[in-house]
Amino acid sequence: MEYNVHTLPNGIRLLHVPFASAISHACIIINTGSRDEKEHQSGLAHFIEHLIFKRTEKRSTNQILNRLESVGADLNAYTTKEYTCIHASFLHAYLDRTLELFNDIVFHSTFPEDELDKEKGVILDEIASYQDQPEEAIYDDFEDMAFAGHPLGRNILGTVDSVAGLNRKDIKQFIADNYHTDKIIIAVIGNYSLQKLVKIGTKHYACVPQNLRKAERIAPLKQELFTRIQHKPINQAHTVLGCSAYSLHDPNKTALLLLNNHFGGTGMSSVLNLQIREKYGIAYTIESGYSPLTDTGIFTIYFGTDAEKVDKALGLIFKEMKKLRDNPLSEIQLQKTKQKFIGQIALGEENRIGLIISMAKSLLEYDRIDDLKTVFRKIESISRADILAVTTEILDERNLSSLTFYPLN
């Protein structure tokens, strides 16, 4: 897809993606997340994402929320371990209004004490709600062990104690230390000329003081393998297996993305779903996942089942791993796997807000955005030997740690 990039004097980049539609989408991506927090600040990046909607130098909470909703637009935000993202979908005429609001909430929020206290309560409720969902909580607990002693292991929401202790000084210092202008992308997809986006983007963002990133993030150390069991007041057992994996910049990344999609990724036709759920009826949900990060990655397998079926499920998973190691994908199987993955990526392009966010992240990580032809060419270039090498390293139970939540009784 065609795109243009314009860099402002302060380092902020404007990403322009022309697309003929009455609906436009925009986002501001800041290369800052929970991994950038100090230990006592756990949950701070997510806390800030909540608070920027509360009050600015010129707007109340209601004015912020109504600025776009009053014209039928949608405004939202989220925080990950490496990013903070604010995004909006709106009618074509409201680009200026949208980018001005992004500027206001990101760079001019006031973080009043009364709002801090209220939002702490909201987040503490969110933490409690999350802990009531073992199928979600187990991932966070597993990552805490897999990245022990590193901020990547900490829950994005923080803990009850850490959130309760956050204050306005922490917020201001975190923004000053981490909201680097050369790591911020303003991205827009819509029926606009580059000149129009540059004009509006310059008006709202050229005045932001330059704040360049001076230090690189610290990569996590590799951890010893672990096997942990925890008993919880739950009705079903939940298990996560996993290991550290390739980073965003590792040449093996594409092969593992392809292997993961075949083994336990999106769709009902994955190996794990067909062999564990459909054939044996053991687990309602069984899946694998691969999340590449800036300087590391993590591969996981998750399933939930009755407590007495955990060992059988593990045995079947290990059996399927061994099959893939001993009997590599045939050329025909590999081509089918590639076709499936390519089709999923192509369909994903129809989600325009997801597309513009993905393009902005790519620009942050690689200083480029590959078009679909380039992405598909990378997938097509993966050989059987590439898949086997990744399979041998990743899909080996001897290299996997595990965490299981068992019911108390």
Image: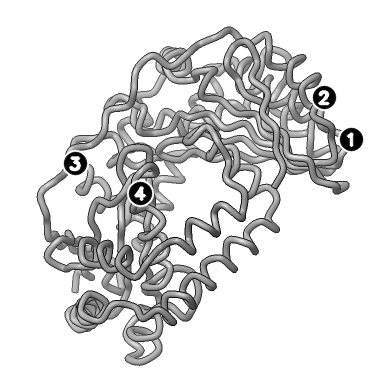
- Real-space CA distance between mark 2 and mark 4, rounded to the nearest whole angstrom: 37 Å
Residue named by callout 3: 148
Colour scheme in the image? one colour
Task: Tell me if 140 is positioned left or right of 70 in this view.
Answer: left
Taking the spot 27% from the left edge, 68% from the top edge, the residue there is: 388
Q: Secondary structure at mark 4?
A: loop
Label located before the other in sequence (4 or 1):
1
Q: Which residue is mark 1?
A: 93
Would residue 132 be seen by someone viewing this image from the given angle? no
Residue drawn at 65 percent across, 15 percent down: 8
Up the image or down, 33 lies above or below 91; here it is above
Mark 2 — residue?
A: 195
Percent position of residue 250, x then y: 34, 45
Q: Nearer the viewer, residue 213 or 227?
A: 213
Helix, strand or loop at mark 1:
helix
Type of amino acid at the residue the image marks with label 3: Ala
Q: Quadrant of the C terminus?
A: bottom left
Residue 341's mark? Answer: none
At label 1, which amino acid type do we have?
A: Ala
Which residue is disc 4 drawn over? Answer: 251
Q: Quadrant of residue 58?
A: top right
Q: CA distance from mark 4 to mark 3?
A: 26 Å
User: How far apart are labels 2 and 3 at the CA level?
Assistant: 48 Å
